[in-house]
Image (cartoon, helix red, strand yellow):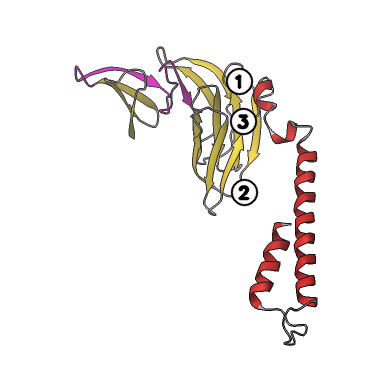
Amino acid sequence: MFIVAMPHRANLVAVINPDKGMLFDLRTKKYLKSVPKWGGFCTKDGKYGLYAPTRGGLELIELKKGSSVKTFIPKVAEGVFTVICMFNKTDEYVLYYHSGRKTLRVFRLTDAKMLANYRVPAELSAIETTEDGRAVVIATVDGCLSVLALADPIKDSFLSTLPSRDETWKKKMDKQRTAKLFKAAAAITKFCVSVSEPNSKEEIGNSISSSQQLQLSKILLKG
């Protein structure tokens, strides 16, 4: 059991039980109604919520009547596992994590179409979306923190900004890599000349000081 605040009305809170959610008005201190199967997550306008039982399945429910509107995942027997579901910050997508499958599925809210089925490397410990709704940040129990882009096929303006969709991106990377290698080669040549032509009469031999070795290592790593 836990309590959530309704985002569209500051005076409303919901007490969430395993089988239903109960709405209360803090201003009048009265019980308003109960919403069957509601898991506590809702859109910013307070119209829709999510129902995701631990046995499997995911549905979009209307909070006013408590009826099912859309089915993202049909009810199937997958065993009892930990389930995390939520809307993104713009209420365009629904995120669903299943600990048994260790997958994070993303659905479009308008047509209930699945856009992604990402397998996480370890058990999920935290999940959040960015304010613009374009990315998902996930943390796993092994200490890994990942940022995943929500690449919706119908959003051409966002897809065009991704590095993988830029036709000149590979050429830009090759050009930068070539420039770094050229600078490294020039620095190494200058260093070799300074060693082979000493300005003092003391013998230098073939030894290289530790500071020069560190400088050379940094140049090679940058390349």
- Can you see residue 74? no
> What residue appears at the point 32 percent right and 18 percent down from the top-left corner?
9
**Quadrant of the rendered structure where residue 103 is?**
top right
Local secondary structure at mark 1: loop
Residue 80 sits above or below residue 68 on the image:
below
Closer to the camera in the image, 30 or 161? 161
Local secondary structure at mark 2: loop
Q: Residues within 10 Å of mark 2 (few under 14, many from 20)?
A: few
Q: Residue furthest top?
A: 65
| Residue 196 image position (x, y, % from top left) | 80, 77
Magenta span contains residue 97: no
Q: Which mark is residue 121?
A: 2
**Quadrant of the rendered structure where residue 100 is?**
top right
Residue 198 sits above or below residue 221 on the image:
below
Q: Which residues are magenta?
A: 26-53
Residue receiving disc 1: 112
**Magenta region's main secondary structure?**
loop
Q: Residues within 10 Å of mark 1 (few under 14, many from 20)?
A: some
Closer to the camera in the image, 36 or 199? 199
Q: CA distance from mark 2 to mark 3?
A: 18 Å
Q: Amino acid at mark 3?
A: Leu
Closer to the camera in the image, 163 or 212? 212
- Look at the image and tell me in which quarter the C terminus lies: bottom right
* Disc nearer the start of the sequence (1/2): 1
> What residue appears at the point 71 percent right and 67 percent down from the top-left corner?
216
* Disc nearer the start of the sequence (1/3): 1
- Look at the image and tell me in which quarter the N terminus lies: top left
Residue receiving disc 3: 150
